Amino acid sequence: MNTANKLTMLRVVMIPAFLLVLYLGLPFGNLIALAIFVVASLTDWLDGYIARNYNQTTDFGKFMDPLADKCLVIAAMLWFVEIGQMPAWALLIVVVREFAVSGLRMQAANLGKVIAAGWSGKVKTASTMVCICVMLLLPNVLPLNIVCVAVIVLTTLYSGAEYLLVNRSVFASMK
């Protein structure tokens, strides 16, 4: 297993650690969870950088890296739903968008096409991670939570719509 894939697997292992810290209700638990989340998020950038620049791109990494990212973000959002900082419908929008884009990518792959991550998807990912960090740093600050949830939902809807519109030819090829 190469370095990029080891970093991806580290991110996967950090997800239960992140949740465990939150569920234990430790003093400064949100700050510890925030630190774990930030480190896990940085491994996403780092494993991609290493994979691209040191010729460590693998099929395992292409599969596991986006899955690890989605699991990390959804784990954080599930926590926020559970403690009342995020409405469940907002998380549902995120999950449906991820399924739709993943399905679109699978169908494109069946056609021999690759759908690269678009600019709006990168903005969605970055803004979601920043908002999760803010919500961990300043829990239960209602106006801030509302803004963060709105940013997450709006960037998710925009990037999902863009992926579907730009790649509508993939749908046309379905029978």
Image: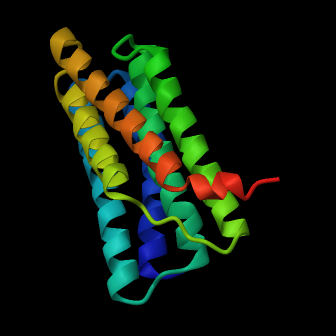
The colour scheme of the drawn protein is rainbow
Which residue is at 51% across, 44% downward?
A: 71
Q: Position of residue 77 (x, y in %)?
A: 42, 29
Q: Position of residue 175 (x, y in %)?
A: 83, 53
| Towards the viewer: 64 or 143 | 143
Please indicate whether residue 10 sits to the left or right of residue 102 in the image.
left
| Towards the viewer: 27 or 55 | 55
Q: Quadrant of the N terminus?
A: bottom right
Is residue 84 at all visible to an observer of this figure?
yes
Which residue is at 24% across, 33% downward?
A: 131
Q: Quadrant of residue 83?
A: top left
| Towards the viewer: 21 or 83 | 83
Which residue is at 59% across, 64% downward?
A: 63
Q: Residue furthest bottom?
A: 55
Q: Position of residue 52 (x, y in %)?
A: 37, 81
Tell me: residue 166, above or below residue 153.
Answer: below
